Amino acid sequence: MYVIEYYVRSGGRKPAGEWIGSLEQSLQAVIDTKTKMLAQYGLELLKTDMVKTISGEDRDLHELRCGQSRIAFYFNRKQSKFVLLCGWLKKKQKHEKDIEYARRLVREYFSVSEGKEHV
């Protein structure tokens, strides 16, 4: 089983957690079910439509598809954990600004993680 955690920004904010908390309870329940599946099956879910890799230079940045909801997450291979970054509701157009925000959060995560490893 894998660990699932929310990325916590300096100041204590959890973008994914705050976004999920703003949704209707029925959507929250779907997301909860899907994150439990992610914890159980990990990247095996890439073989399904439930998890897709977000294209770009970082192959460990993915989206968890929960109906119309999307949660961006990073897979930390060293620690075998999934870090939930942010979320958005899927509409017809591509969500480039949401994906770019997820990429910024990954870069931020790296800078914080690297600092902790050198302490």
Image (spheres, rainbow, N blue to C red):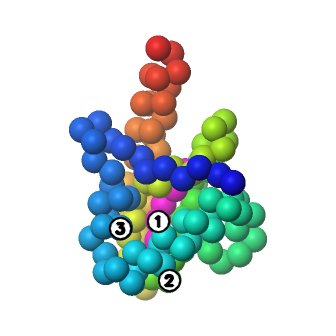
Instruction: Check if mark 2's residue and mark 3's residue have beta carbons within 8 Å.
Output: no
Q: What residue type is disc 2 on?
A: Gly
Instruction: Give the residue pinned by disc 1.
Output: 71
Point out which mark residue 67 bears. 2
Instruction: Check if mark 1's residue and mark 3's residue have beta carbons within 8 Å.
Output: yes
Above or below — where is 79 with respect to 23?
Answer: above
Secondary structure found at label 1: strand
Q: Which residues are magenta?
A: 69-75
- Residue 70 part of the magenta-drawn span: yes
Give residue 40's position: percent from left, percent from top: 68, 62
Question: What whole-number distance in Å separates the C-alpha atoms at marks 2 and 3?
Answer: 13 Å
Point out which mark residue 20 bears. 3
Question: What whole-number distance in Å separates the C-alpha atoms at marks 1 and 2?
Answer: 11 Å
Q: Earlier in the sequence, mark 1 or mark 3?
A: 3
Above or below — where is 77 with respect to 65?
Answer: above
Give residue 53's position: percent from left, percent from top: 62, 62
Label 2 crowd bin: few (<14), some (14–19), many (20+), radius 10 Å: few
Q: Quadrant of residue 98?
A: bottom left
Evaluate whether residue 94 shows in this view. Answer: no
Q: What residue type is disc 1 on?
A: Ile
Q: Residue at x 48, y 78 (%)?
A: 30
Question: What whole-number distance in Å separates the C-alpha atoms at marks 1 and 3?
Answer: 9 Å
Q: Residue at x 27, y 70 (%)?
A: 22
Q: Residue at x 47, y 65 (%)?
A: 71
Rendered-image quadrant of the N terminus: bottom right
Point out which mark residue 91 bears. none
Secondary structure found at label 2: loop
Q: From the viewer's perspective, is the residue at label 2 or at label 3 nearer?
A: 3
Give residue 2's position: percent from left, percent from top: 65, 52
